[in-house]
Image (cartoon, helix red, strand yellow):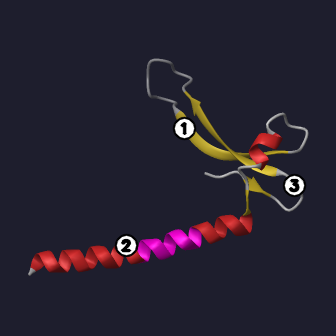
Amino acid sequence: MYVIRLPDGTLRVPQSVLLNPDEGTDEGRIIAQAYVEIGPDDPDYDRLLGQSLTEEELEEKRRGWREGDADLLRQFEEWKAGRDD
């Protein structure tokens, strides 16, 4: 998950949550990842701003991953076909 910089300057910061209300058991255990929004008044804002991506930059990264996945799948299929011979 990435820190996302919104057009108004607000940052969406990933936050993980692990709650286990029944200590000693797995019952009631909640594990979640979500985003919280912070503004310039937050003490971590300046540090996180340097790591942030715009929504457009994040989409560009995702597009690159998808294209890379297609190339990797093609290479795997070629390798697998060579082993079947």
Q: Secondary structure at mark 2?
A: helix
- Would you say 28 lies left or right of 78 here? right
Closest to the camera, between mark 2 and mark 1, is 2
| Residue 59, image quadrant | bottom right
N-term-proximal mark, 2 vs 3: 3
Mark 2 neighbour class, 10 Å CA radius: few under 14, some 14 to 19, many 20 or more: few
Q: Quick one: label 1, few (<14), some, or many (20+) residues within 10 Å?
A: few
Q: Are marks 3 and 1 in contact (CB under 8 Å)?
A: no
Extreme residue in the top direction? 24
Identify the residue position indicated by label 1 in the image. Answer: 31
Three-letter amino acid code at the position of disc 3: Gly
Residue beneath disc 2: 72
Residue 81 position by quadrant: bottom left
Main secondary-structure element of the magenta-colored stretch: helix
- Placement of the C terminus among the 4 image quadrants: bottom left
In this rendering, the answer to whether 20 lies above or below 9 is above
Whole-percent x, y for residue 42 in the image: 85, 37
Q: Earlier in the sequence, mark 2 or mark 1?
A: 1
Q: CA distance from mark 2 to mark 1?
A: 31 Å
Magenta region: 62-70
**65 is within the stretch colored magenta:** yes
Do tag 2 and tag 3 residues touch (Cβ < 8 Å)? no
Q: Residue at x 72, y 46 (%)?
A: 13
Q: Which residue is mark 3?
A: 9
> What's under tag 1, amino acid-wise?
Ile
Please name the amino acid that badge 2 sits on: Leu
Q: Nearer the viewer, residue 52 or 27?
A: 52
> What residue is at 82 percent from the left and 41 percent from the top?
45
